[in-house]
Amino acid sequence: MAGRVAVVGATGAVGEDLRRLLEARDFPCDGVVFVASERSAGRRLPFRGREVTVRALTDRDVFDGVDLALFSAGASTSREHAPRAVAAGAMVVDNSSAWRMDPDVPLVVTEVNPHALARRPKGIVANPNCTTMVAMLPLKALHDAFGLVGFTATSFQAAGGAGQQGIDELEAQVEPLFAHRDLLRRDGAAAMKLVEQRVHADVLAFNVVPLLGTEGDDGYTDEEMKLQNESRKILDLPDLRVAPTCVRVPVMVGHALQVRAEFEDPVTTANAISSLEGFPGMVLDRAPTPLAWAGRDEVAVGRVRADLGDPRALNFWVTGDNLLKGAALNTVQIAELLVEGAAARG
Ligand code: A2P
């Protein structure tokens, strides 16, 4: 039993799924504290047939009596407030990028490296980036069979990866652009001036945006570097060669990636499929789309094809709900493993 569970960022897109999953999975706890910014303090959110009043993170005693805190309120908030929760006696599972690359913080995909949970000197466990998460399940299955040495990935990331604001911005752009759909064919640049754009790097509705995150000096964005650095840590392959490109697409939720993976050993399509089959949390499908998989727990893999030129390479497609396995579901699954571990030790 986890005692009291705090959800920090309870009013956000991931927070909404965290609340729903704690309830739907009958998470073993005897109370919840919903936490957000001062803007949301006093709002009432349903949980297990009752209404829970949202508290401000700035309240001094907000973590008193909390045994487990699930954070999804952005990196700077986590950096400042996760240590407060630990000091108050809580285990923390953090969904932001704040702690992921800290050597004293395990970065865990529950089907891939649950053993990493055993060592957590800071009392914090990090949940991986939503795009990296989706790719980890098939790459781990294939690594175990053929020995992964590197991969090239192009992501197709949903608006919801930028939180509720990302979804709101896409929604707001659709109707004005559709009302002038002649311009979408004749003068796209004029059409783009009809809508506001702030969250995504360019107008997203009826478009594809090949820039996601903040560019570094080498031209790669921070989002692309997460795909390299987090994959290396999760798979425990420090020399893994990763060539990432992250693209935002006008999908509400559900990230997808096209991956070309390279291995030590030769790989055929048939051998790859039998290695992928049965991996927990993952299913095979012919050509799974983010829309068809929105709202589902599993990650879906399709278009599995041996490479045309290199007998040691394989191409495949993977998609998964970025708010579920990509965020809230894995966070709750980590919490379930922590509670089981505590129960086993107790
Ligand atoms: P609030 O709704 O009060 O702004 P999303 O990822 O969908 O944008 O959600 C972000 C979540 O993190 C929301 O619940 C938001 O609360 C919360 N949040 C953002 N900044 C802070 C902060 N400085 N302190 C507490 N909660 C925050």
Image (cartoon, rainbow, N blue to C red):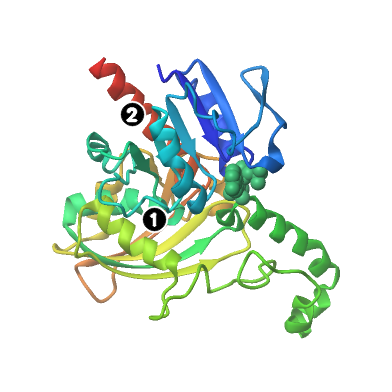
Q: Total label count?
A: 2
Q: Position of residue 179 (x, y in %)?
A: 86, 68
Q: Nearer the viewer, residue 104 or 278?
A: 104
On screen, residue 302 above or below 281? below
**Label 2 belongs to which residue?**
337
Q: Nearer the viewer, residue 322 or 267?
A: 322
On screen, residue 189 above or below 172? below
Identity of the residue drawn at 19% across and 67% down: 312
| SS category of the residue bearing label 1 | helix
Identity of the residue drawn at 22% across and 73% down: 310
| SS category of the residue bearing label 2 | helix
Identity of the residue drawn at 47% across and 56% down: 287
Task: Kindly tell me whether mark 2's CB lies below 8 Å from ligand 1.
Answer: no
**Label 1 belongs to which residue?**
132
Identity of the residue drawn at 20% across and 58% down: 237
Q: Position of residue 117 (x, y in %)?
A: 27, 36
Q: Nearer the viewer, residue 141 or 189?
A: 189
Q: Quadrant of the image for the C terminus?
A: top left
Q: Quadrant of residue 159?
A: bottom right
Residue 170 shows up from this direction? yes
Q: Is residue 193 left or right of residue 217?
A: right
On screen, residue 331 above or below 241? above
Q: Quadrant of the image for the N terminus?
A: top left
